[in-house]
Amino acid sequence: MTTAPEAPPNSVGAATPRLHHYGLAGWAGLRLRQEISNWRLFLVRLVTSGLAVVLTVTILPGLQFASWGWGRFLLIGLIFGLLNALVKPVIQFFALRYLVASYGLVVVLINALMLVLLSWILGGDIQSRGGLSFLLGGVLVGVLGLVLDSLAGTTPPILDQSAAAVTTESRVSEKTA
């Protein structure tokens, strides 16, 4: 006698709490605490964000550093990482309507705004020939950040390994049955 197949475990992982009266905000808070406590992930994201900004300013002819030293690299990475972690989600929340309507093209404007804020916080250390340079820098920092984060492995997988194994096992058992 065959029994009904068991439901696959939660594909998000064992660390995902069940939604309760706190709802999605409680889950997001727990995930944020887990990501902050992972200092290696924080360090890798710090390096990738700093490298993305340095490469953007170096590659793009309209942007340049007023003064450069390798000690500034960590400062740039730290400040840009904090901007991306704290300020960017707030801006994306308020621009959500425009993000959806433009199919995500507003992200380029938000990245350009992050570069402008970084330049302002650093006291004009990133000099620009105009607004178009920051706009092109927003495109480039977004693409470079995505590539570097993917190469470094900081982006979470779309499908968890345990869920992929369950899916593969169920396909194999379906073919043999």
Image (cartoon, rainbow, N blue to C red):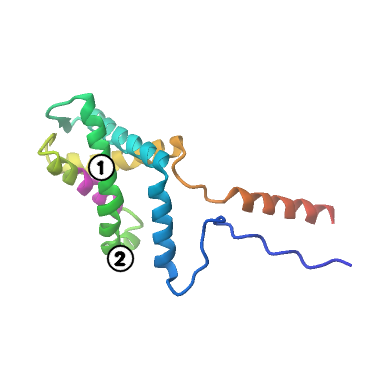
Image disc number at residue 80: 1
Does 33 sit above or below residue 140?
below
Does 94 sit above or below residue 39?
below
Whole-percent x, y for residue 40 in the image:
41, 38
Does 61 sit above or below residue 137?
above
Residue reaching furthest to the right: 1
Residue reaching furthest to the front: 37
Residue at the spot x=22%, y=27% of the render? 71
Amino acid type at mark 2: Arg
Residue at the spot x=41%, y=41% of the render? 41
Taking the magenta stretch, the answer to whether it contains residue 110 is yes
Apparent side of residue 88 relative to residue 127 in the rendered image (left or right): right
Regarding mark 2 in the picture, which secondary structure is present there? Answer: helix
User: Within 10 Å of the Cα at label 2, are there few (<14), some (14-19), or many (20+) other Cα atoms?
Assistant: few
For the residues labelled 1 and 2, the Cα–Cα distance comes to 25 Å
Apparent side of residue 141 relative to residue 15 in the rendered image (left or right): left
Badge nearest the viewer, 1 or 2:
1
Q: Which of the two discs, 1 and 2, labels the residue nearer the N terminus?
A: 1
Q: Which residue is mark 2?
A: 97
Amino acid type at mark 1: Phe
Magenta part, dominant SS = helix
Whole-percent x, y for residue 157 in the image:
52, 47
Does 33 sit above or below residue 55?
below
Taking the magenta stretch, the answer to whether it contains residue 5 is no
Residue at the spot x=26%, y=29% of the render? 59
Q: Quadrant of the N terminus?
A: bottom right
Image quadrant assignment for residue 52:
top left
Apparent side of residue 144 relative to residue 64 in the rendered image (left or right): right
Whole-percent x, y for residue 114 in the image:
22, 47
